[in-house]
Amino acid sequence: MNLFKFLSILALVAVAIEAKSLGEIEAEIKAAQNRLEKSQSDEGALQTKVDALSKEITNANALIADIEKALLVGEKEIKALTQKVSSERGEFSALQKQKDVLVSERDAIEQRLVKLLANHAAQSLVLEKSGAQSDADMVKIEIFFRMRDRVQKDTARLKLNYADKIAQIKKAQNRIDELQNNLDALAKADARQRALRSDQTKLIETLNKRKNGYLAELNKLIDQKNRERQLLADLNIVRQKTVDDMKQSRITAQDTLPGAKIAVKHYGASYQGAGAGAYDGKKVKAPLDSPPIKLVKEFGPYTDPVYNIKIHNDSVTLRASSSDALVRNVLPGKVVFADNIKALGKVVIVEHQGNIHTIYRNLDSISPNIKVARSLKERESIGRVSDELVFEVTKDGLPINPLQLISI
């Protein structure tokens, strides 16, 4: 087989392989878009539930505030009525004692009156039988009648006083009964208000639990949506790189024949005017933990030695001295992506202050502690690499030369 035919077949195979990879990537992008749309829909539904619950909680809190005001008023009224009932009971007790004294006095007078009347009746019989009345007898009779009149007057006065006291006692008792009834009614109303407050408090606790549950689901959805967005962005990057690689592979085998004159061709979006960022902060240690570290491929434009294609490399490729080198995070930050991407291998992306992202590609393994949304300290383990680490840095979305950030 001549060289031209061999290179032609090789080019066709490369195109077929890349086309298949691109189709798979497109399918992954479509799936990620569908998941993102569903997450957004679910997020909207959950947000509606959270808003409705927030209104219910606000209304329930307003009702509790009204109940608290009513309870304060009720407590003041109960306190005042309790003092009044206590005072009325004191007056009632004093009246009862007065009544008891009057009853005793009335009974004593009535006994005296009965005695006098009995003596009067006996003396009258004696005088009627004797038929004679001496001066002494006449005096005794006069004294008796005067005493009788006095006792009768005292008895009448006592009866009036007794009747007045009985009326006062009855009035006081009626007043006490009225106050007690009002106090009982207030106590029942207060108990109802307290029960209502208890029910409202339990309702608010239940609503808050439901709301917190919805918020937890909402946060999970937002995290999932952010991961899908990040994955979608990464997949789009992969798709662009795959398309660029396919363009490179379409160079005809004839262009590569010995002695052929090949003009330099430009491929890769980053080379076509995407621009590069700049970093002017302090330098940090390289991500590989096995010095000495060898720089295999530099950042920036270069000409492919095989196809003579001018492209732009957005990363640096590093090789450690050991075959199972530890890869470390170079700056404090938060993991925004950690997964296996076809054509890029295992990838970890970390977000740092200043809108800086560091990207670690071609990993053989990702450390078990690396999870999306987890905060990382500087020099914390990310994974391991057995061959070469592809290390990329972006600032404000633009690639920057990683050697501006790290020292090797």
Image: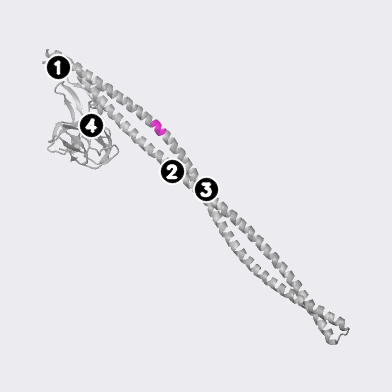
Name the mark nearer the viewer: 4 or 1. 4
Q: Which residue is mark 4?
A: 346
Q: Is the residue under label 3 in contact with that under label 2 (CB below 8 Å)?
A: no
Q: Residue 44 at x, y = what percent?
A: 41, 33
Secondary structure type for disc 1: helix
Q: How far across and how far down the image is residue 16, in percent?
A: 23, 18
Three-letter residue code for mark 3: Leu
- Mark 4 or mark 3, which has the lower sequence index? 3
Quarter of the view holding residue 81 = bottom right
Membership of 124 in magenta stretch: no
**Circle 1 is placed at which residue position?**
256
Instruction: Count residues near mark 4 (Cα–Cα under 10 Å), then give few for <14, some for 14-19, many for 20+.
Output: some
Residue 46 circle label: none
Q: CA distance from mark 4 to mark 1?
A: 33 Å
Q: Which amino acid, by three-letter code, is at mark 1?
A: Thr
Compare marks 2 and 3 and give the one earlier in the sequence. 3
Count up the numbered dots: 4
CB contact under 8 Å: marks 3 and 1: no
Identify the element where label 3 is drawn. Answer: helix
Could you tell me if residue 163 is visible in this image?
A: yes
The amino acid beneath tag 2 is Asn
| Residue 62 horizontal/vertical position (percent) | 50, 46
Q: Separation of disc 4 and disc 3 at Cα? A: 59 Å
Q: Residue at x 47, y 43 (%)?
A: 57
Q: Nearer the viewer, mark 1 or mark 2?
A: 2
Q: Quadrant of the N terminus?
A: top left
Toward the front, the furthest residue is: 129
Pair 3/1: label in front: 3
Disc 4 to disc 1: CB gap under 8 Å: no
In space, the residues marked 1 and 2 are separated at their CA atoms by: 71 Å
The magenta stretch is 40-44
The Cα–Cα distance between marks 2 and 3, rounded to whole angstroms, is 18 Å
